Image (spheres, helix red, strand yellow):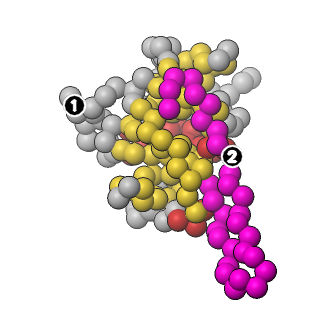
Amino acid sequence: MTEDTNAQASESPNKQPRAGAGALASPARRALIVARAGQHRLAVFADESEGVSKFADPAPLPSAPPAVLGVVAVRGRMRTLIDPLPLLQPPTAPLTSPDEAAPTLALLLKGDEQLALAVAGVERAADIPADSILPLEPAHDFARGTVTLDGAHVLVLDPARLFEAAMRGHERRRGR
């Protein structure tokens, strides 16, 4: 995928068996956008994404937790840029190693929070059976589970829970 690519992919329709074929209908399928963040491969459902775009240096937010890199302007909208690495690794682990690419792309997420996920690259779109996502052990509240693609585990994120997980332990400023 290239810069500013619209990463939405339509869901594949279910294949219906021919009458008398005796075959069962295939399970519902979902399109995923697969990205890299540090040593992790993660994904969101394509219908929960508004595309991918490069970002400039985010404007930092005072007293923001480590997972909130700041605010970026993308396509005329302000987005809170979330770094998934602090959410995925223990607090004592280094967030990156010298050979890892720094995030330069924002995976734009749909939703009321107007989030973007900082990623080093977008690998591909993948069409998977919806029931192929397996639960996590231990569970992350911001993830739906994992799916195996090309022999590697990919964490499937839940954008609706990502902001809450990033803000955990920090008071969110409310309007007066």
Q: Measured along the vertical axis of the image, is residue 38 above or below residue 52?
A: below
**In this picture, residue 171 sits left or right of residue 35:** right
Q: Measured along the vertical axis of the image, is residue 131 above or below residue 109?
A: below
Alpha-carbon neighbours of circle 1 within 10 Å: few (<14), some, or many (≥20)? few
- The quadrant in which residue 175 appears is top right
Q: Give the range drawn in magenta.
A: 1-30
Alpha-carbon neighbours of circle 2 within 10 Å: few (<14), some, or many (≥20)? few
CA gap between label 2 and label 1 equals 35 Å
- The quadrant in which residue 173 appears is top right
**Which residue position holds label 1?**
99
Magenta residue check for 8: yes
Query: Can residue 68 be seen here?
Result: no
**Which residue position holds label 2?**
10
Q: Measured along the vertical axis of the image, is residue 108 above or below residue 158?
A: above
Circle 2: element type: loop
Nearer to the camera, 88 or 49: 49
- The quadrant in which residue 104 appears is top left
Percent of width and height locating residue 90 = 32, 46
Q: Which residue is drawn at 66% across and 64% down?
A: 28
Magenta residue check for 12: yes
Which of the numbered marks, if any, corresponds to residue 29? none
Amino acid type of the residue that numbered disc 2 sits on in the rendered structure: Ser
Percent of width and height locating residue 29 = 63, 59
Q: Residue at x 30, y 35 (%)?
A: 95
In the image, which is nearer the foreground, mark 2 or mark 1?
Answer: 2
Amino acid type of the residue that numbered disc 1 sits on in the rendered structure: Asp
Query: Can residue 7 be seen here?
Result: yes
Circle 1: element type: loop
The quadrant of the image that shows the C terminus is: top right
Q: Main secondary structure of the magenta part?
A: loop
Furthest toward the left, the residue is 98
Q: Residue at x 71, y 35 (%)?
A: 112
